[in-house]
Amino acid sequence: MIRAVAFDVGETLIRDDRGWGAWADWLGVNRHTLSALVGAVVAQGRDNADALRLVRPGIDIAAERAAQEKAGRAEYLDETDLYPDVRPALTALRSAGLRVVIAGNQTARAAELLRALQLPADAVATSGEWGIAKPHPRFFAGVVELAGAEPDEVLYVGDHPQNDVTPARTAGLRTAHLRRGPLGHLWAESEDARSADWRLGSLTDLVDVLGVR
């Protein structure tokens, strides 16, 4: 029985284009160029932050984020960054008595911004707050703790098969792969994606497969 559903953030709940566009502007590179580089490193199975390292070799990403904040160009999210199925799906899950958790590889500031959106969720946490990121097992131990249920009663939903599906399954959680965003589409037919308990085209599909409305 599923008692809690935990969601990845980037390209699961929110679009990543604002963030990458801001990085392109900050580094003085064409937005299309950076977007293409993100796609290239993703296709190679690399960390998408490697796109920034290709634009500026040796970049200290944390230091650049701090400089952005100092310049008044801090990370930002608002309602327009959410995919349109997010609020209806999370609301339906919560109304059905499931605990809803948000936990992804984002900064501590992103966690604050997500909380400010007042999503229908019981808990929000990010790797920046925890000091540990996916796919590390400790990240998923944190998800289980937030969920307040046994691992096999927690469903983790994400777009990245290698960062979301496989490590969550290894940690004993149920899994759903969301075909959304560059990673979700590129790796949709990978062995990792096919190993998920459910494969989704949208969060509306999740509501349907769990039988809640």
Image (cartoon, helix red, strand yellow):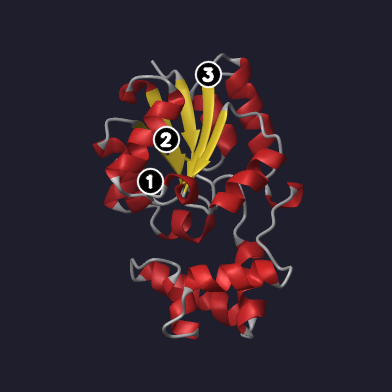
Q: Amino acid at mark 3?
A: Leu
Figure quadrant of the N terminus = top left
The disc label shown at residue 156, or none: 2
Q: Name which quarter of the figure residue 85 lies in.
A: top right
The disc label shown at residue 207, or none: none
User: Would you say the residues marked 2 and 1 are in contact, meaning their CB atoms lie under 8 Å apart?
Assistant: yes
* Drawn side of residue 194 relative to residue 116, left or right: left
Query: Badge 3, how many Cα within 10 Å: few under 14, some, many 20+?
Result: many
Height in image: 18 above or below 117?
Answer: below
Question: Which residue, given by chain and number where applicable, does mark 1 sit on?
Answer: 164
User: Would you say the residues marked 3 and 1 are in contact, meaning their CB atoms lie under 8 Å apart?
Assistant: no
Question: Which residue, given by chain and number where applicable, does mark 3 sit on?
Answer: 98
Residue 213 visible to the viewer? no
Element type where label 1 sits in the image: helix
* Distance between the alpha carbons at the discs numbered 2 and 1: 7 Å
* Drawn side of residue 4 relative to residue 92, left or right: left
Q: Name which quarter of the figure residue 89 lies in.
A: top right
Query: Badge 2, how many Cα within 10 Å: few under 14, some, many 20+?
Result: many
Q: Amino acid at mark 1?
A: Asp
Element type where label 3 sits in the image: loop
Q: Earlier in the sequence, mark 2 or mark 1?
A: 2
Give whichever of 36, 79 is nearer the camera.
79
* Distance between the alpha carbons at the discs numbered 3 and 1: 20 Å
Figure quadrant of the C terminus = top right
Q: Amino acid at mark 2?
A: Tyr
